[in-house]
Structure formats: C-alpha cells, structure tokens
Image (spheres, rainbow, N blue to C red):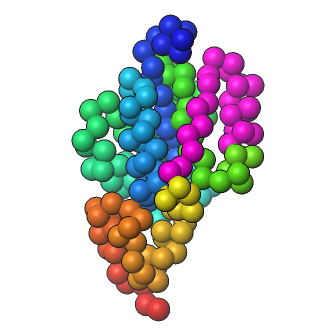
Amino acid sequence: MIKEHFGMKIAVYPGTFDPVTNGHLDIIHRSAKVFDKLIVAVLNNTSKNPLFTVEERTDLLRKVTSDLPNVEIDSFRDLLINYMKQKDAHLIVRGLRAVSDFEYELQMASTNRKLDENFETFFMTSTPQYSYLSSSIVKEIARFHGPVNDLVPEVVEKALLVKYADVIL
C-alpha cells in the first residue's frame, strides 16, 4: 500500500547523531530492510553546541553504514519537510526509546503533517538493549574516560577518545 501511494519507498531518518550510537545503528539497519532507500540526514542545528562537526558526524555515519547499499548519508539545515521535498521522500523514520520520547515525537510528527499532509512518520521502537542509550549519555561517559565500547562502533569510540584526549579530570 505504501509503495503504491508513494512510489519508491524513500525514507529519511533525521537526527543530530552527535555521535552515532549502537542504538541509532540498530534503527538504521532495521529501517534499511523496510524501505527501498534510507537517507540518514544529519541535522545542522544551530541552537545546539555539538561535540562533532556536521562533516565529522556524516563521515562517521558513512563509515559505520558502508555495508548498507541502500543507505545514503546526508546533512541538512532547513525544515525537515523542505529537505524531504528536495529528496522526493515522503516517509520519516523516528526511533523511540521510552514513553517519554513518544510525547515529543508525536508533537513533531503532528507538526510535520500540519505543514504537509503528504508526509508520514514511522516510529520504530528501540531494541531493549539500547532503550536507555543516548548520545548525551555516551558523551558524558567518554568525557570522564569511561568505557563506551559497548555503546558505539569502534570508529566512534576512537573519535571520542581523540575529542576528549585533553580533558583533565
């Protein structure tokens, strides 16, 4: 039904991915099985002060998704709806870790539908082993030189070590 209504199933998974975690990767891998094409779109949010630049985040995402031929990594600095129109995509993927995520995500999905009713949001629940995981938690642990090897891919762990190498406790 989705394919008939929208044509090729192109979905966008937007986020800051600062940094990409194993939880994000779980959603990416599972979404890549559902949609013909998945665009992981790194938001260049000027209201946040990210640890990694947009270029670093997109580079890390490219490295950790290189085994997924239908996944494209991109970045944007606009309303999500405007970006999706540029990409000819009509499906938004959002991950839900807990009930607390749902309230915010429902508000965003409703806002996007208000802006343009031709867009649908698909909520994908986290695998239980990642339900607590966030980029903020990863950065906090890494900042204090704690182990993050079970939370992020190895390339991200190394990037975090470099970022926090000069942090003196």
Q: Is residue 48 visible?
A: yes
Residue shown at 54% from the left, 35% from the top: 93
Let me know if residue 111 is in the magenta part. yes
Instruction: Using the rendered view, name the quadrant where residue 122 is placed.
Output: top right
Q: Is residue 59 visible?
A: no
Q: In this view, does 140 lie to the left or right of 37?
A: right
Nearer-the-camera pick, 114 or 152: 152
In this view, the residue farthest toward the bottom is 169
In this rendering, the answer to whether 5 lies above or below 149 is: above
Residue shown at 39% from the left, 34% from the top: 32
Looking at the rendering, the stretch of residues picked out in magenta corresponds to 105-127
Horizontal and vertical percent for residue 58? 37, 48
Residue shown at 46% from the left, 83% from the top: 144
Horizontal and vertical percent for residue 153? 33, 60
Let me know if residue 1 is in the magenta part. no
Where, quadrant-wise, is the N terminus in this rendering?
top right
Horizontal and vertical percent for residue 103? 75, 46
Nearer-the-camera pick, 74 or 118: 118
Residue shown at 50% from the left, 7% from the top: 4
In this rendering, the answer to whether 163 lies above or below 42 is: below
